[in-house]
Every structure is written in C-alpha cells, then in structure tokens.
Amino acid sequence: MKRYRQFLPVIISDFEITNWEHPVHNHNHYELIYIKKGTGLHHLNKGIINYKQGDLFLLGPEDEHYFEIKESTRFVFLKFTDFYLHGEEKVKDQWVQEMEYLIKNKEIGLSGFELKTIDQLVIDSIYEVIINLKPDLQTNERLIWLQIMALATILRRNLPEITSQERKGKEMESVFAYIHEHIYTPHRLKAQVMASHFHTTPDYIGPYFKRNTGITMRDYIGNYRRTLIQKRMASGYYSLKQIVLEFGLTDESHVSKLLKNKQNL
C-alpha cells in the first residue's frame, strides 16, 4: 500500500476535481478533510461512506482511504503532523488534550459525526478562514492552530457517545471514551470511581474490560498514558515537571521510570 509522507508541520490543500487519481493509501500525518462541494463515496478502512457538501472527516496516520467522485468535488485538506500538535508554545494542555481525546476516540470507532445544522455553518466559516490563511503558512501558523482547535471542539461535541444516550452505561465505547477523557486525572481512573460512574461494581468493570479487549484495564490505561507522554518528550517542548503536573503524577522520577522500564503508572 502506498504511504504518503509529510515533512512540513502543516499543509493546506484546496482543489476541485472530477476524478480521484490517488490509490488507496495511508500517511504519516493527520488530515481534516472538508467537502466544500460535491458528492461521492469515501472508501475508508474497508468501509464506504457517502459524502456530500459540508461533510468533515478526521483521519489518523494509519487510516486507509481513497475517494470515488460522483459529482465534481472541492476538497479542502488540513494536514498536520504530531510535531505540529505538540511543538512550540501555541496553546497547550487543555487544547492538546482536546485533540488527543478526539483522535483516540476516532481510532476505536467513534468517528460517525452527525453534525448539527449550526455546527455545519460554523465549520464552513472556519474553513473559509483556513483557505484565506493558506498563502502564508509560516506567518499564519498560530491562527491555523486555533482553527484546528475550534474544529476539534465542534467535532468532540458531535461524537456519538455525546449525542446518543443509548451508548451510555457499560458499552465498551463509552468506557474507552471515559478513559481517554480522564487520562490526565489518575484518581478518576481508579476502579471504584469508574465503577460508580458506570453504575456497576469494581469487581465487575475490570473483568468486563479484559473480557472485551483481551487486555487488563490497568495495562490499557498505562500504555495509553505512556504513549502520550512519549509524544510530549519527543517534541522537546515539555519538561518533566510540566508532564508531572499535566498527568497528575507523583514526581519526575515517576515519568522517568515509566519511560525506562515501560511499567504502568
């Protein structure tokens, strides 16, 4: 399979075509793809989605996709790397966490955005701003970042586990969503607290998670937290002290031990 590699932190592409010439592929970056006009099919991870004007797709590095165009389609691609997400002094902590939550939930299946009418209008306006920022990416980097964060906020409130009450309770997707949201507050990930949230018992929720995922809940939480910390360390823009405070850890040695020995937090 073809893999596209992006070396610049952020790229904006705005184009209209009648034929899609790229094969099925994945990439080393994230993509927020907005359908400015047109209709067709989006082949995504062996599934098929009918797309139309106003649709917005969030793709991660390992997503496989291509488009099949029915009516001439104008695409606006906003493509950014992990470095762009974590690098430099933009707007950190809460906004980075917002994007991480969205990306992680997308990876476990919560990507079926049913956008409210008002949100569709706001997203269209945001993409008009993005298109106008395209001629000078370097000067407008911070402004582009703010548009990404605005999109993340809108998409998050349109995730299925937020908009559909029947997805609550003990469903695995709701459990994943809870873990991803509270990964920065360890006390909320204790079995007793989680069990109370999902109206069950500590003796039930752990085995339930293991039975449905093949991994213990403790291991999943530890692995996910480690991945986030490793990305912060790799960016070079976070100190150990900042990471300790953000993730509610004991001290700096706690972080070092995790990264060295790959032990769960």
Image: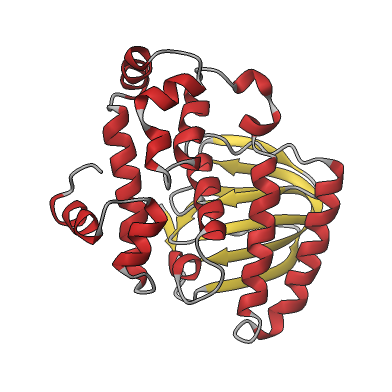
The colour style of the image is secondary structure
Q: Nearer the viewer, residue 169 or 132?
A: 169
Q: Position of residue 111 (x, y in %)?
A: 60, 39
Residue 196, placed above or below residue 259? above
Question: Residue drawn at (62%, 36%), measured in percent from left and top?
Answer: 48
Q: Position of residue 142 (x, y in %)?
A: 62, 77
Q: Position of residue 101 (x, y in %)?
A: 52, 46
Q: Give left or right: position of 172 versus 239.
A: right
Residue 24, placed above or below residue 13? above
Question: Residue drawn at (48%, 47%), measured in percent from left and top?
Answer: 63
The C terminus, quarter of image:
top left
Question: Residue drawn at (47%, 77%), measured in percent from left and top?
Answer: 88
Q: Which image quarter: residue 86?
A: bottom left
Residue 228, placed above or below residue 194? below
| Residue 97 seen by the camera | yes
Q: Position of residue 207 (x, y in %)?
A: 31, 16
Q: Which image quarter: residue 260?
A: bottom left
Q: Give left or right: position of 41 versus 206.
A: right
Residue 64, placed above or below residue 201? below
Question: Residue drawn at (41%, 57%), measured in percent from left and top?
Answer: 246
Check the image and name the residue furthest to the left. Answer: 261
| Residue 5 seen by the camera | no
Q: Nearer the viewer, residue 135 or 242?
A: 242
Q: Nearer the viewer, residue 20 or 244?
A: 244
Q: Nearer the viewer, residue 61 or 191?
A: 191
Q: Give left or right: position of 162 versus 203.
A: right
Query: Disc count in the image?
Result: 0
Q: Give left or right: position of 57 versus 129.
A: left
